[in-house]
Amino acid sequence: MRNPYIFFFALVLVLSWIVCVSGGGGVFQVNHKFGKKNYWSLTDLKVHDTNRHAAINVPLAQGHGIYYTKLAIGSPPRDYFLIVDTGSDVFLVTCAKCAPCYPTYTDSNPTLNYYDPKLSSTSSLVPCSSSSNKVCGYNIGYGDGSTSTGYFVRDIIGYDQISGDFQTTIRNADVSFGCGMKVTGNLGNLSLDGLIGFGASSTSFLSHLASEGKVSKKFAHCLDGRNGGGIFVIGDIVGPPLKMTPLIPNGPLYNVIMKSIQVGNSVLDISQFEAGEGKGTIVDSGTTLAYLPGPIFNPLRLMILTSQVNLSTRIVNDHYGCFEFHKSLDDSFPSVTLSFENSLELKVYPHDYLIPNHEWYYCLGWQDSRRLKSDLIILGDLVLNNKLVLYDLENQALRVSECSSTIGLKDEESGAIYQAGGSNNLSSYPTRYNKHISSSPAQHFGRVIQLVLLSFMLYNCV
């Protein structure tokens, strides 16, 4: 969720979130809301992305992420499922007596878990200042009209702390977060219990952890969105050399400068969209596809679809550029190479950008960003798939390498390096997140990715 207008009764509170965590790493299970699937509904993916980038010239205005984690909150602990979003800067949980808060479900699809501070022996209300007993409230609004209103509380979060190679022990963290009492608009349709943000701004959860000295202000992910598996790391990683490109500083988004796009051996001119008001390139793991301005998208689409003689394209569910194909995708269609400032290159293979829609039917995953009312280049899960992408906010750089099966984590206190790897175990996820909860059939499944923090290690099921 991006570019909200936020009215805090005490700004000081927001800039001093209380996070008491000992050194080491922790583990949470995390799912991807669209899940593992042999065939994808391109409609569902495009609807998600349109909602996420709802406002004109306000990218990620709504910002509904596609990863979620399970956290145990309170004493006794109770499980809550929260969106984990690189496009969000807040940590909120929907609370008891929230009205309106929706959706609710039938017996086969239980209602969401509402956090009730009165039922936790370790909860406490957070005052606006040390000299005041007045509870501190918040009111957050998003570009699409969604809102969340409530107050701040403090409670225990249970997590697994990394203690060795692929080993964890149970630990607790004392954290302040927003307790939502009124949730409206699309924000109430997340089908989850809240959200936790890892955006680029100084108010994100990552920034608060870093300000407390618990983690380095860095995170990385290696996503396998098509088949499941992957790792998401927060903290210092030890691994293969990473090529870098500068992040555009002082912005809430992860913006970079793209210099060229090459389709096979042909280079597209993208200079008019390289930078400027309402232009540029955003890297966003919460977007499913990849979006290009019309003057870039149209020739790219033509080059890809005409690379095969006599390829018969058709419209499938209102999506142009779908076709039946029985040969190897990577041997038949051109790769797309994205070149960035400082000579960083990302190669997107045909099996990444051609989305299986039905058996032997594929649709183009590249999309025209005008459908988002934007001239931005937005690189989502389609481009980031199977790439190790490091967001180095300490040095304002984006670093990229090929994925490996494990990632080494450096413990800042001991200097020890622990190995973390992906997981594909879905057994711990409640049925309410694997059953039909909307008209979107793509939400019936889970696919696994592992999120790993040096102070919090998150397993992300994609």
Image (tube, rainbow, N blue to C red):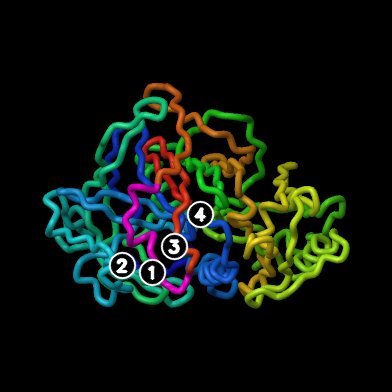
How far separated are the C-alphas under marks 3 and 4?
A: 9 Å
The answer to whether residue 201 is seen in the rendering is no
Q: Earlier in the sequence, mark 1 or mark 2?
A: 2
* Stretch in magenta: 426-440
Q: Earlier in the sequence, mark 3 or mark 4?
A: 4
Identify the amino acid type marked 3: His
Identify the amino acid type marked 2: Asn
Q: What secondary structure is marked by label 4? A: loop
Q: Earlier in the sequence, mark 3 or mark 1?
A: 1
Residue contact between numbered discs 1 and 2, judged by CB atoms under 8 Å:
yes
How far separated are the C-alphas under marks 4 and 2?
A: 20 Å
Residue 314, position as x, y percentages in the image? 74, 73
Residue 407, position as x, y percentages in the image? 51, 32
Which of these two is toward me, 323 or 111?
323
Residue 412 lies in what quarter of the image? Answer: top left
Tag 4 residue: 36
Tag 2 residue: 109
Q: Which mark is residue 110?
A: none
Q: Earlier in the sequence, mark 4 or mark 2?
A: 4
Tag 3 residue: 444
Q: Which mark is residue 437?
A: 1
Q: Earlier in the sequence, mark 3 or mark 2?
A: 2
How far separated are the C-alphas under marks 3 and 1?
A: 8 Å
Q: Residues within 10 Å of mark 4 (few under 14, many from 20)?
A: many
Identify the amino acid type marked 4: Lys
